[in-house]
Image: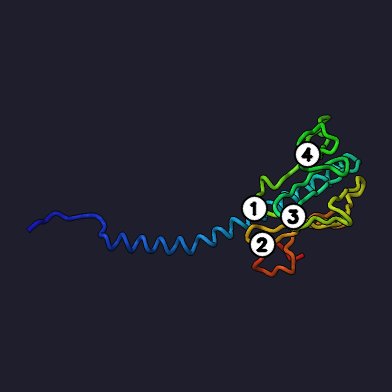
Amino acid sequence: MDDRSQSGYTLVELLVTLAVVAILVTTALPALTDLIDSQRLRATAQQIAADLRYARSEAIKRHADIPIGVSFAPGRDWCYGISQQLPCDCRERDWRSPDACLLDLAHERQLHTATHDTRAHVEVLDARFSSDQTTQFDPLRGIARAGTVALRSARGKRLDVRISTLGRVRICAPEDTGDSASPAGFAPC
């Protein structure tokens, strides 16, 4: 009689473990993809809202009109820029160009733009402020031309960044999309 004990896994045990892992991965992967999609949309909306709030605070701080121009093209080729003159071309990368979106910060002219390059999985569906794609904040009261920047993720989720006439910037879920088409945590518009 051989008294040596053997350790290790049998082939059946390994196959059962692999089957369980495969089932878990296939059920978790869509949820993970959905979570990443929602986070990309949320981050883009929060960045646009933060830049709009920044433009408002700069206008009030300087007592000078600081417009923010939101320029977009259908699809994913979007950009926006904050500038002291309108219109500005947010695609212009040369700060010496008269169309560049520039801010004078500490006696230095700086480009202030954001593009789809850093947020490739989010699309700007529309940007409407009164009659065009720009808004301007009043230097005394911080009021603005009301408007909406409508965003859509690669998986169809939607969020709006809205500016009220009082200059309040908020992120909300469009009501016409239903609960499944907007990330959790945002009030309906």
Q: Percent from the top left, x then y, of residue 54?
A: 79, 45
Q: Nearer the viewer, residue 15 or 42?
A: 15
Residue occupied by mark 2: 157
Up/down of 65 relative to 165, above or below: above
Secondary structure found at label 3 = loop
Residue found at the very far left of the displayed protein: 1
Q: Nearer the viewer, mark 1 or mark 2?
A: 1
The residue sitting at 7% across, 58% down in the picture is 1
Q: Residues within 10 Å of mark 2 (few under 14, many from 20)?
A: many
Q: Please give the name of the residue rendered at 78% of the width and 39% of the height, measured from the top-left corner.
A: 92
In percent of the image, x 63 and y 55: which residue is there? Answer: 39
Residue behind mark 3:
74
Label 4 CA crowd tier, 10 Å (few <14, some 14–19, many 20+) = some
Of pointers 4 and 1, the one earlier in the residue sequence = 4
Asked if 134 appears above or below 62 in the picture, the reply is below
Task: Give the residue at mark 4.
Answer: 92
Which part of the image, by quadrant, shows the C terminus? bottom right
Front tag of 3 and 2: 3
Where on the picture, by quarter, is residue 25?
Answer: bottom left
